[in-house]
Image: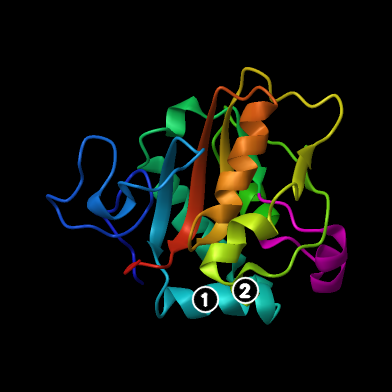
């Protein structure tokens, strides 16, 4: 099922046993991340890729228990599982969520069973951006600029947060979300994704 045991705890890419340096791997040495660490269930190739696409694009929500089980087990092995105050699903713009009928990240977060961590939806998407897969890698950061904000009276200050999303490719979405959360006072922001793409980049 493309479950990966050896991955970089900073960028999530699959790595060899001796490729993890103290804080990163050779592939992310020059990359800037606002999230502090990442956990993943696997890499973005078959059959996990097909499960994710069927789940969110073909309305196969019956796959939720399987994907949630992957998430629960992967997060349980993460280095930061005991630190999380809030799970924050990466938000969709309301028009996209209305069209799809659900936010896949929120559905996964709702199934998690970590008694000390609660779901928090005070991170919102403020404008409808182009789908990240529709723009070049160079344009992805610009595409997401000022696309997220926190609600008034949020409770992120002083908290440790774990973002939940389905796939990380360049990390631009997670990065922008983490940046906004830290500006709102979060002391640490971690990330979990079902799968990490862009293995060769």
Work out which quarter of the rendered image holds the C terminus and state it.
Answer: bottom left
Q: Does the stretch in magenta take in 98?
A: yes
Report which quarter residue 200 is drawn in.
bottom left
Q: Name the residue carrying label 2.
A: 55
Q: Name the residue carrying label 1.
A: 51
Residue at 60% in and 73% down = 133
Q: Does the stretch in magenta take in 147?
A: no
Which stretch appears magenta? 90-104
The spot of residue 33 in percent (x, y) is 47, 42
Lateral position of residue 157 relative to residue 151, left or right:
left
Is residue 2 at least partly visible in the picture? yes
Residue at 79% in and 72% down = 100
Q: Distance of mark 1 from mark 2, alpha carbons?
A: 6 Å
Report which quarter residue 44 is drawn in.
bottom left
Lateral position of residue 122 relative to residue 55, left or right:
right
Marks 1/2 in contact by CB < 8 Å: the verdict is: yes
């Amino acid at each position: 099922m493309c479950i990966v045991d050896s991955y970089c705890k900073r960028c999530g890419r699959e790595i060899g046993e001796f490729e993890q340096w103290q804080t990163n791997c050779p592939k992310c040495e020059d990359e800037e991340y606002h999230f502090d660490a990442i956990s993943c269930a696997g890499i973005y190739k078959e059959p996990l890729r097909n499960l994710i696409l069927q789940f969110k694009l073909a309305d196969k929500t019956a796959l939720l228990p399987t994907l949630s089980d992957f998430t629960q087990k992967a997060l349980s092995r993460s280095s930061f599982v005991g630190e999380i105050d809030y799970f924050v699903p990466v938000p969709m713009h309301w028009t996209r969520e209305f069209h799809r009928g659900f936010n896949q990240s929120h559905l996964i977060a709702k199934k998690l069973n970590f008694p000390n961590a609660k779901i928090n939806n005070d991170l919102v998407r403020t404008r409808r951006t182009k789908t990240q897969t529709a723009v070049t890698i160079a344009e992805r950061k610009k595409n997401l600029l000022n696309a997220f904000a926190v609600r008034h009276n949020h409770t992120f200050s002083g908290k440790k947060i774990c973002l939940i999303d389905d796939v990380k490719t360049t990390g631009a979405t997670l990065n922008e979300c983490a940046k906004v959360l830290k500006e709102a006072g979060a002391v640490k922001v971690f990330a979990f994704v079902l799968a990490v793409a862009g293995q060769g980049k």
